[in-house]
Image (spheres, helix red, strand yellow):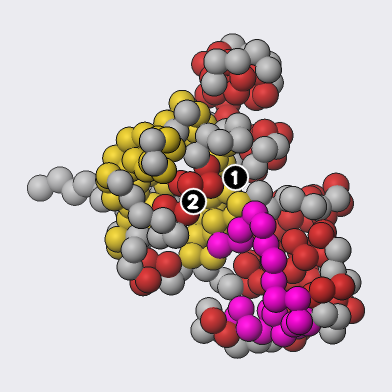
Amino acid sequence: MSLSTPSLQPVVRISGVSKRFGSAVVLRDLWLDILPGTFTGLVGINGAGKTTLIKCLLDFCSLDTGKIEIFGLPHHSHKSRFRLSFLPERFTPPHFLSGREFVRTMLGISGLAYEEMVTRSMFNDLGLHQSALDKPVRSFSKGMTQKLGLAACLLSQRDFFLLDEPMTGLDPAARVRVKNLLGSLKAKGKTLLFTSHSLADIEEICDHMVVLHGGGIAFSGTPRDLRNKFEEPTLELAFLRCIGTDG
C-alpha cells in the first residue's frame, strides 16, 4: 500500500465570494487559497476591492455568494480568528491610553500576559523610543502610532497576520526594521496577508501576490511570474500591463 502526503489545509480558503453594494459589484466570484507559511501581497488600484475583501474575511460585512474559511472554520465563527492578528490601515488607538496600557490591553484580549522586557525589546526592534511606553497615545506622531500598532500585533504571537498597508507613515529606517521583523515571522513559519501600494515591498517581502482589478482576480502567482508573463523588467510595468493600462 502506498502512502501519500496529505495536502496542506489552507490558512484561508475563499470560495466563489461575491459582494455588491447596491448596484455596484465590488467582488466577483473570487477563488483563492492562502497556504501556511506563505507571504501573500494583495495589490490593486484604489477601488479594486482590497478593503472589501478584508472586511469580508473578518466578517465585518456579509457575503452575497460563496464562503470563506479560516483555519478550516467558517469565517463568521469567532473561533476562526483566534489565531489571527489584524492591523487596519487607519489604525487609531484610544487616545487616552499610554503606550504601555495599550499593549497591555491588546495582549490581555489575546489571552497573553504583559511582559515589560519583551515589550521594550519589540519597541527597540521597531525603533520606537522607550519613553513611548509612558506617553499618552494622543501625543504620538503618525509614525509612532503605526509602530505601536505593529508592536501590539507582532507581540500577539498569532499564526496568521493580516496587515493592511502596514508601512503607512513609516520613514525608510522604520520600513527596514519592519521588513526585518517580517522576515523573522517567515523563518518561524507564520503566514502573512498584507496590502500595499508599494510593489517594491511586495517583490521584496512576498512569495505570492494577488492582483485585484474590477472586483476580480487578474493574477495570482509569484512576483517573478507576473514579470515573466508580461515580459517586463519591473513589477510596476507588469502590474500596469496586467490591469490593462499604461499608467
Mark 1: few, some, or many residues within 10 Å (few <14, many ≥20)? Answer: many
Residue at numbered disc 2: 54
Name the image quarter holding residue 78: bottom left
Report the span colored magenta: 86-107
User: At x 40% / y 60%, what residue is drawn?
Assistant: 59
The answer to which of 6 and 42 lies nearer the viewer is: 42
Q: Quadrant of the C terminus?
A: top right
Query: Are the residues at dot 1 and dot 2 in contact (C-beta closer than 8 Å)?
Result: yes
Q: Secondary structure at mark 1?
A: strand
The answer to which of 24 and 32 lies nearer the viewer is: 24
Mark 2: few, some, or many residues within 10 Å (few <14, many ≥20)? Answer: many
User: At x 41% / y 48%, what residue is drawn?
Assistant: 35
Q: From the viewer's perspective, is 101 left or right of 57? A: right
Q: Earlier in the sequence, mark 1 or mark 2?
A: 2
Does the image show residue 178? yes
- Mark 1 vs mark 2, foreground winner is 2
The answer to which of 50 and 172 lies nearer the viewer is: 50
Residue at numbered disc 1: 195
- How many numbered marks have been drawn onto this rendered protein structure? 2
User: At x 15% / y 45%, what residue is drawn?
Assistant: 2
Separation of marks 1 and 2 at Cα, in angstroms: 9 Å
247 drawn magenta: no
